[in-house]
Amino acid sequence: MRSELTRFPLVKALLKNRWPQLLVFIVMLAGFLFAILSGFIGTPVGSSNFGIVFVWIAWWAILILVAVPFFGRGWCAVCPIPLPGEWIQRGAILEPPSRKPRWLNLRWPNKLRNIWLQNLTFTLVALFSSVILTTPTVTAIVLAGMLFLAIGMSIVFERRTFCRYICPVGGFIGLYAQAAPLELRVKDKRVCATCKDKPCYNGSQVGYGCPWDVFPGGLTRNTYCGLCMECLRTCLYDNIVVNARPFAADLAKPSTRLDETFKAFIMLGAAMIYAGVLLGPWGALKLAAYSVGTTAWLGYAAAFLALIFGILPAFFTLAVKVGQRLSRASTPQHLFSKFATALVPLGLMFWVAFSLSFVLTNAAYILTALSDPFGWGWNLFGMAGIAWQPYLNALLVPLQTLVLVGGLLWTVRTAQKVGTEVRVSPIPVIVFCTLATLVMLGLLL
Ligand code: SF4
Ligand code: SF4
Ligand code: SF4
């Protein structure tokens, strides 16, 4: 059941108008540049530096606990990273200019039109995350690097190639956006079939062609729609709508792509490893993760890679094969990838449970960093002296248990639906997901 949100004139007007989006963009861009600045010139103590605290605690909390579960790619609709590049590429900030700038405008190579590079960039960030998350200058270098890479790619390639194929954050937002209760779709595909110039994809005088290289008329999943609202502005037939819908509606159409399947394994494994390293009691593991370049770190990195690219996929393959044996079914195509759809709600809830711990433990730093963003002894809002304390401590364990058990039930439902579609028993996959949830419960509680 879907409910069209754009039927309300105020919602539609707000989404179509470029000004409200631009105002949010400007605030976000200012915050982003300030985070980079504080990383370079502020205190090297991570917990007192605006860059670390606002990116890895405040932004992360909003992203994982609110934006992705409820709005899917909603963050990408206001993200500042691709903005300067996009403005340069378009030669305009708002409406299309009368004369387009002459950049190279190359097509992204066909062989790279997948998310393997995004899997790689996320894995690299995850491997070095203990340093990135705690060292302000490294955070600033990573953020500035993303900004300049996005600008460079906008000058060389058409549309938003950085977002679509490189951004380490964009890959997992796209994966979990499938679970969100919000979507942008066309009202009637038959109208698109007769639409001649397809301005939603090719652009027109009133708006730009889809920056994410998506043809809106063919949208069936949220994964690659950046919710930028350009197609809402350009469609000649008022055929674009934004709908509220049930959670996880996209998972009824399981992905058959191996790059997306491995994204699910990477995210699942990374959540477990982060829980062990950042919240677990193992000093040696923490030390290994933080000692980048040492033999201990190499061992940690090897274990990390083995878990996400070897152990988890191998046990999952075994579960799928046992399910096949139990059903005496022939081998339907893409069985492995289709069943891996069940890992989408599981992984999302792993990240929510982990982030609750991480964010509630460190939230006090947000207030102090607001008052003293560079750690220079300022006290702008009178909160610089607030002592560190964890928030909602008594609620944390029940909340995390609820999230993980709820995630497992959601996963079981998804696996059952896939099993019915492919006529293969989902029970071994459900056992795999249950064991993974028990491990995560053990790591968090
Ligand atoms: S894909 Fe990455 S850079 Fe692009 S809008 Fe989304 S989060 Fe920002
Ligand atoms: S402009 Fe509108 S009607 Fe035409 S193809 Fe795009 S979404 Fe469909
Ligand atoms: S133009 Fe439409 S389909 Fe393309 S990213 Fe923006 S909102 Fe999504």
Image: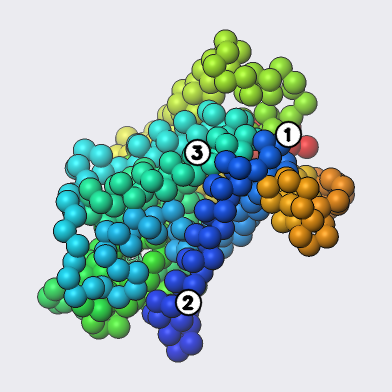
Which label lies toward us, 1 or 2? 2
Which residue type carries mark 1?
A: Leu
> Which residue has dot 2 on it?
20
Which residue type carries mark 3?
A: Ile
**Residue 290 drawn above or below residue 442:** above
The span from disc 1 to disc 2 (Cα, nearest Å) is 39 Å
> Which residue has dot 1 on it?
279
Which residue is outermost to the left? 196
Rendering quadrant holding ligand 3: bottom left
**Residue 257 drawn above or below residue 33:** above
Between 321 and 271, the one lying in front of the other is 271
The span from disc 1 to disc 3 (Cα, nearest Å) is 26 Å
Which label lies toward us, 3 or 2? 3
Which label lies toward us, 1 or 3? 3
> Which residue has dot 3 on it?
141
Q: Please report whichever mark, 1 or 3, sits nearer to the chain's N-terminal start.
A: 3
Q: Disc 2 on helix, strand or loop? A: helix
